[in-house]
Amino acid sequence: MQFETENLEDYEIKKAVWDIIKKFDTIIIHRHVRPDPDAIGSQCGLKEMIKATFPEKTVLVEGASVDDLEYLDTMDYVEKDLYDDALVIVTDTANIKRIDGENYRMAKQWIKIDHHPLDDSYGEVEWINTEASSCSEMVADLWLTFPDEITMTSKAARLLYGGIVGDTNRFLYDGTSPYTMKVAGELMTFDFSYTDLNDKMNEIEPTTSKMMGYALEHFELSKDGIGHIILTQEILKTLGVEDSDTHPVVPFLGKIAGVKVWAVFVEQPEGTYRCRLRSKGPVINIIASNHGGGGHPLASGAHAKDMKEIEAILNELKANV
Ligand code: AMP
């Protein structure tokens, strides 16, 4: 099935992306550090699509492996020399410093495919669609734009569906559009168990459930609807969890009535804090970029060097509601 392309400029960018992919024999796909299901889904889903369409091409995925996302896919080991004649595609990554892997700089050409607001400009072709729910939706959209040329497989469909589910929190977030549902519906016609995948994505470790209990108990909510929790290294150690286990707590805290904007601060081993910022209305990505981060208007990330900077972030969020 082919959907009508409404935006000609968007169509032309997609055509440019696909034309460049056709030209290269070696394609290496990167994504952002600390990947989430959308980063892995868009990266590995794109790899599977290209490989299925052009079995003779070398298509590899690069980046640190992440144990708790191995149910989606695993990374390749990419020899440095391969970059000399390669095309690099970076998915889901707004800024250069967040690209996972170093060697992308040595490639012949770069393409950026992203759904975040423009941060760093990079790549000969930049395909940015902030209307897309996820980068995985964009990759699936590439297939739906050229369905006679691009081969979709069950493995690619599973990866892209997983990426969309991850970034929309199962089609709940406002980035979910009628087109998102159409794309997801098309992917669901392939042979993979979306029930098993949804169950896996929804699963949390028993230690994480204890951490969520702690977070719910200690979540502070101000009169004006600003919620926050600080998870120190000491707390993480006591609960037997690591930073990478803390992400399920973020959407969960947003369920509490009265919360307009919320922040989860996780202390890193060196003493700084990773900040996850979420909002049900007020735009927060400008505040995130004031603190070394960025992201979407309603879902962003940043860094705080100490408690003083955490206070500053909370004050900025307060002034913004
Ligand atoms: P997270 O809170 O890590 O789930 O990220 C929420 C959104 O903000 C995602 O779209 C991330 O790509 C983006 N984001 C998180 N941390 C940063 C950062 N340090 N710089 C730029 N964007 C970020």
Image (cartoon, rainbow, N blue to C red):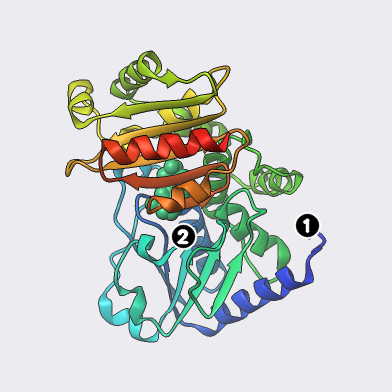
Q: Image quadrant of residue 305? A: top left
Pointer 2 and pointer 1: residues touching (CB < 8 Å)? no
- In this rendered view, identify the residue nearer to me: 320 or 172: 320
Query: In the figure, residue 204 lies in which quadrant?
Result: top left
Is residue 2 placed above or below 15 in the rendered structure?
A: above
Amino acid type assigned to the residue bearing label 2 in the image = Thr
| Residue receiving disc 2 | 93
- Secondary structure, mark 2, is loop
- The percent coordinates of residue 96 (x first, y second) are 40, 67
The answer to whether residue 162 shows anywhere in this view is yes
Residue 238 appears left or right of 230? left
Name the element at disc 1. Answer: loop
Q: Position of residue 283 (x, y in %)?
A: 58, 43
The Cα atoms of the two marked residues, 2 and 1, are separated by: 29 Å
Residue closest to the eye, 35 or 269: 269
**Residue where numbered disc 1 is placed:** 1
- In-image side of 225 versus 70 (left or right): right
